[in-house]
Amino acid sequence: MESLLDQVRGLPAAARMQGRDIVISGDTLATDTPVLRVAPGWTVSTDVPWTVRNNGVCDGGIIRLSKGGRSATIEALAPFCDPVIRAE
């Protein structure tokens, strides 16, 4: 969980460094090189795509971390992608 929260916090800097928007979507999370990485056995998903702009501004969005019957919802708050764990 801490690793994922750190990755979310780092998205604005990554977008600025890469000079391009970073889109968080089902497609970008399901690739061989996902935007956000989790430990084996865990999955991370989002129902609604969201973007971190190349200037570092985060549109904000929701991601879900799950494994088996356990899950957590994380909201990345605009404009800095500050992650907040939401109650299930």
Image (cartoon, rainbow, N blue to C red):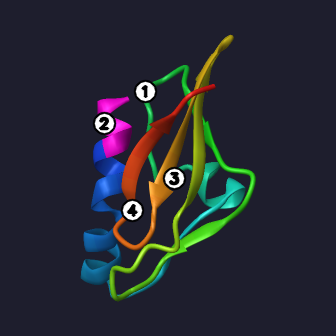
Q: Which mark is residue 81?
A: 4
Which mark lies nearer to you, 1 or 4?
A: 4
Tell me if label 3 and label 1 are in contact, CB under 8 Å. Answer: no
Where does the magenta region start and end? 1-5
Q: Kindly identify which residue carries mark 2.
A: 3
Q: Is residue 71 left or right of residue 57?
A: right
Q: Earlier in the sequence, mark 1 or mark 4?
A: 1
Q: Earlier in the sequence, mark 3 or mark 1?
A: 3
Amino acid type, mark 4: Cys
Amino acid type, mark 3: Pro
Give the residue at x 68% y 65%.
Answer: 49
- Give me the C-alpha separation between circle 2 and circle 4: 15 Å
Tell me if label 1 and label 4 are in contact, CB under 8 Å. Answer: no
Amino acid type, mark 2: Ser
Q: Position of residue 79 (x, y in %)?
A: 40, 73
In this view of the protein, which residue sits in the foreground, 53 or 37?
A: 53
